[in-house]
Image (cartoon, rainbow, N blue to C red):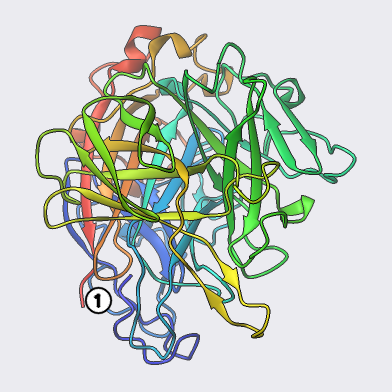
Amino acid sequence: MNASLVRAYNGDDKNNIVVNIEGQGPIPFSLSRWNQGDFAPRLAPRHPYSQTNLGIPGGKDGYQSDNPMEFPLQAWRPSLDKGVVLGSVAQNGQQWDDGAPFFYGTVSCIYDSHGYGYSMDTGEFGNDNPNIDIAIGKAGEQDEGNIDVSIAWFPYHQGWTAGYVDAPSELDKGGEAKWATNASHSSNLPSDLSRILHWDKRGASLELPGVNPSRDGMLFLTSTDPGQWSNELNIMSTYVKRNGRGWRIQAREDAFGDVTELVESQEHMFAFLYIPFTAPGLIGATIAADGSVVHGAGVFTCKRLAAGMYEITIGDEHKTHNDGILLLQVMGRDDSNRHYARHAFLSYNFTAQGSVLVEGHRLVKEPSQMFKETFPYTDTDFAFVWVDFRNPLSPTLRSYTGPLPERLSGYRFWSGIVTGIVAMAVATVAALFFLSYYSISQVPSVFTPLTSLQPTQSVSAETELAEELLRGVYINAED
């Protein structure tokens, strides 16, 4: 989504943006809908011309269609019941020639989308919600934005520990803990969410069985609230509780300047992913505010360059957006009030030297000047994970605790990881996707998968869950 053609932010031409795919392989993906500030990613499109809606100006309405004969729509809609989508901002600030000021981006992976595609649950064509959409905002009182983001899809049956949490009715009195849907979590987590998650006036407390969050792994989060009470996106922060028996999870609007201000109970909906440090192929770590490594795995370095600026090198080779993406998570207690998680948000850029520059910012509202907002650099603890397009990380086998859920019975099910880049703006945008193919009678002949996409064997045993097929795609924006 390149907004260089837009002349008036939120004007009549606000959706006249461009998205383009420059490189990919071997399995592509498509966008079934896009306009200012959001797009609908779809997995494993059937047709080689599934990206004909990209690389050209969107016009007044961006791109949208409900026609199953349109190639970009002949693809799978990511399902809450099959995996989790996470995202990070992949550009350290942006300004377009649309009359709006320079801004810092925020991103949420929500399940409220108008984009069409085929259901991973039933095989039917449509856009029924819950339906994954990527929402991009501007920090502060600025609503939607167009900026680079990276997104990733982590399937439950591959062995990832993850799930979608519904919002409670109340926070102060401890609302009911429940999943977004009955099946929106990995099979190694209890169907009764209250066994591992509790609400109180300061958000959620999550405790994963057998996991010491201080040393065993990292928790990544995304808000899934579609902006039902305001036009602002929510930012998720977390810290390890003092007893070492779980994480505190809190949500703030990206327009909140007070560290103690959290969103209303109805907006406290989110998705989470746990990545153990024992995950094969993991390059990632928890980083202290001073840039030192607290815990980590893989070959990397991290150095604090200045307040709120951290340089990360991945492996021994020069890295660009063609090689992978970075997922980021704000961590730690805020210095001004230790009962609350860090009041900050993160983004990253690749540098000309092949490293990654991570920036931390916070919103400050000037009390003497109404509507005056600044976004100073701020030191913060954080977690990162590098998702390599050629050799991505995979879950630890022992994290998978049983056979595939019964709801998949009757399906010929296989999987592979699809990695890629989705660009919103002039730089890169990245995406890691998981490819799932079902042999479902409801899918019309127009969506019969290509012969080259047929699996060599079905997933039938625990050991096979690690034998995922790597798929890549590179998408970038153009002027």
Task: Assign the C terminus to one quadrant of the image.
Answer: bottom left
Image quadrant where residue 197 sits: top right
| Disc 1 crowd, CA 10 A, few/some/many (<14, 14-19, 20+) | some
Quadrant hosting residue 445: top left
| Residue at (90% x, 40% y) in the render | 173
Looking at the picture, does residue 113 appear above or below residue 290? below
- Viewer can see residue 208: yes
Quarter of the view holding residue 209: top right
For the point 66% across and 26% down, the residue is 242
- Where residue 144 appears, as percent x and y from the top left, is 51, 72
Q: Nearer the viewer, residue 277 or 225?
A: 277
Q: Is residue 35 left or right of residue 211?
A: left
- In this rendered view, identify the residue nearer to me: 154 or 205: 205
* Residue that appears at 23% across and 37% down: 471
The residue to which callout 1 is attached is: 56
Image coordinates for residue 404, horizontal then vertical, percent: 50, 16
Position of residue 386 measured from the top left corner of the image (x, y, whole percent): 29, 37
Q: Is residue 251 left or right of residue 312?
A: right
Q: Amino acid at mark 1?
A: Ile
